[in-house]
Amino acid sequence: MENSLSIEQFKKQFSPKEDDLLKAFFDLQMEKWDFARNNYGALKNSVRKIFRFTDTEVVAQFNPNRVLSTMAVTDPEKIKNRKCFLCEENLHKEQTGLELTENYTMLVNPYPVLSKHFTAKFNIHKPQKITENFDDLLNISEIFGEKYFALYNGPDCGASVPEHRHFQAGIASEFTIINEARTLLQNPSGGKLRAVKTRGGAELYAAKDFLRNYFLIRGDRKADIRELFFNVFKILEQKFPSERETKINLVMFKHGADFILLIFPRKAHRPSVFYNEDETQIKVSPATLDYGGVMVFPRKEDFDKIDKETIRQIFNEVGFSESDLTAVADEIE
């Protein structure tokens, strides 16, 4: 990417005073990029509702700037000839990149859901495919440390640009599911984590809360995390195949010396309410952020009508049931 800087170049040119390099990069973009600054200003004033369940919560966010992502057409045939807004020639002219790794460049996301919302884009136009870039997710998470997380939206699970490989990132403490996972890990024998398999010093658990059934991997060696992830992924592909990739959302973050990977297997891209043609229609298209507890509604009428029962229905339709997760876990054992 022509308009980008390596981490060393960034440090030399701008001499950031703090250790938080991503914050310094974000602040620089806010100084130079009016469009992004205005959207982050609007996010600060966005209306929210909090729905509390037995052991989890969901923050509903009215965010009209996310309408293109929620309504995105992701059918392979229909996206063939559209402009890819992650390719260099289609970026905003004010957009600067920070070279995270040899393959990935960090960008400030101009349509934020989080107070500091980033996109790490692959430097070549290739489709989302986690089997080819899982190691990149590990490496990026290692660079981030504990303060930031990285996420992956599968091509049929919320990625609005499935044709261009990318991750998203934000501040870990702002993401509901991460805070809840950290709490779970303080008491892994408390009944909500079922030990499934170990590899070296890494552990694979089946996890559940009121809304979700998912897998959690914890370990301090990337090779062990990788092996356990592909143990899960292989079974998911066999039992729940999909056209481009088994439906999956991922969250990766550090917890002390450990890497933590949350694996959310999915049954559906969108819930039935998305397609309804009467007053019950709600345009919500759950991606990793939504599934992790920050649900985005670009239309005010949908934000106004969302309630606890509908949230539960949405999660039940797009996510795994406890029996689905158990079936996969039993195969792994």
Image (tube, rainbow, N blue to C red):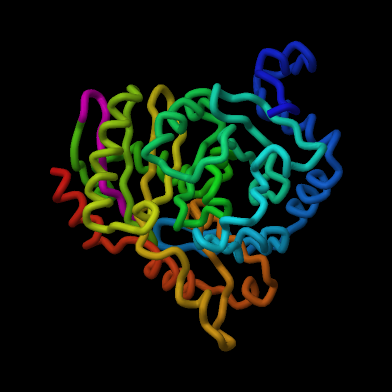
Q: Is residue 202 part of the magenta span, yes or no? A: yes
Q: Quarter-wise, where is residue 115 in the image?
A: top right
Above or below, 1 against 127 in this view is above
Q: Please give left or right for residue 258 compared with residue 175 in the image.
A: left
Q: Please give left or right for residue 244 compared with residue 107 in the image.
A: left
In the picture as drawn, the residue positioned furthest to the front comes out as 81
Which residue does the image show at 67% across and 77% down from the upper left?
Answer: 301
Q: Please give left or right for residue 118 compared with residue 198 in the image.
A: right
Above or below, 223 against 180 in this view is above
Q: Please give left or right for residue 181 compared with residue 149 in the image.
A: left
Which residue does the image show at 47% across and 67% down from the upper left?
Answer: 270
> Between 176 and 34, which is closer to the camera in this rendering?
34
Main SS of the magenta segment? Answer: strand
Which residue does the image show at 67% across and 52% down from the upper left?
Answer: 83
In the rendered view of the protein, which quadrant contains the C terminus? top left
> Between 275 and 11, which is closer to the camera in this rendering?
275
Measuring from the top left, give residue 324's x and y in whole percent: 24, 60
Q: Is residue 225 part of the magenta span, yes or no? A: no
Residue 179 shows in the view: no
Measuring from the top left, give residue 135's x and y in whole percent: 41, 29
The number of numbered badges drawn on the structure is: 0
Measuring from the top left, give residue 325's x and y in whole percent: 25, 56
Above or below, 192 against 308 in this view is above
Q: Which residues are drawn in magenta?
A: 199-208
Q: Quarter-wise, where is residue 69 in the image?
A: bottom right
Residue 131 shows in the view: yes
In the rendered view of the protein, which quadrant contains the N terminus? top right
Which residue does the image show at 56% across and 35% down from the upper left?
Answer: 122
